[in-house]
Image (cartoon, helix red, strand yellow):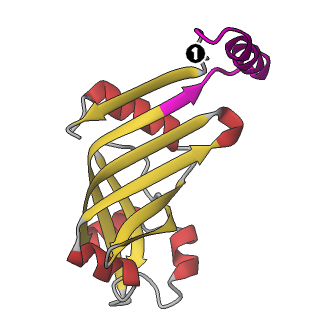
Amino acid sequence: MSSQEHKQKVWKLIKDVKVGMLVTQDDSVPRARPMHLVQDEYDGTLWFFTRASAEKVFETKQDSEVCLSFSDQGNGTYVSLSGHANLHRDQGLIDKYWNPFVAAWFPEGKDDPDVTLLEIKVQFGEYWKAKDSKAYQLYEIARANLDKHHTPDMGENEKFGNG
């Protein structure tokens, strides 16, 4: 779990990225695939639509520990979130998060029995937010190459939660 401050920071960093790479375990091999956020706020839980028949569903039933990574290279934002996956076929939640983007992936509509929600309860994470100025970043890299005792200051980095 993380503090309210961390939750707000995480949401600020990922809300515009929208797509994260979900990493599950396929037997003993990590496997990643893109997942699109469907919520408008973050309280420590992330929601995604998926098919109940999808391989990732079977993988999360075997091992519910997952990792999500979000990257916005243009803004120098990188977020890694780890937690536990659960599946929900709650019609109230499906109705709440249903939108035209999701509908495009489920032509049978939100009443299709294969429609389900994947809930990720985030336990811990880490984020990196680079300094906005590319010139500053280049300066820090050049300085570190000239002064072996200097480590580049590229921006914020923080771990949070119980990890």
Relative to residue 10, is residue 62 depicted above or below?
below
Above or below residue 149? Residue 106 is: below
x, y percentage for residue 72?
Answer: 62, 43
User: In this figure, what is the number of numbered marks?
Assistant: 1
Q: Nearer the viewer, residue 65 or 138?
A: 138
Residue 4 position in % (x across, y down): 27, 29
Residue 90 shows in the view: no
Of residues 56 and 31, the one drawn nearer to the viewer in this rendering: 31
Q: Residue at x 48, y 67 (%)?
A: 32
Q: Amino acid at mark 1?
A: Thr
Quadrant of the rendered structure where residue 163 is?
top left
Classify residue 118 by image quadrant: bottom left
* Residue 142 located within the stretch drawn in magenta: yes
* The N terminus: image quadrant: top left
Which residue was labeled with disc 1? 151
Query: Under tag 1, what secondary structure?
Result: loop
Residue at 41% across / 71% down in the picture?
Answer: 49
Badge 1: residue crowd in 10 Å (few <14, some 14–19, many ≥20) = few
- The magenta stretch is 128-149
Does the magenta segment cover residue 96?
no
Q: Residue visible at 38% across and 31% down?
A: 8
* Residue plotted at (41% across, 63% down): 23
| Residue 92 appears left or right of 128 | left
Image: 148 above or below 83: above
Residue 78 x %, y % = 54, 39
x%, y% of residue 52? 33, 84
* Residue 60 is at least partly visible in this image: yes
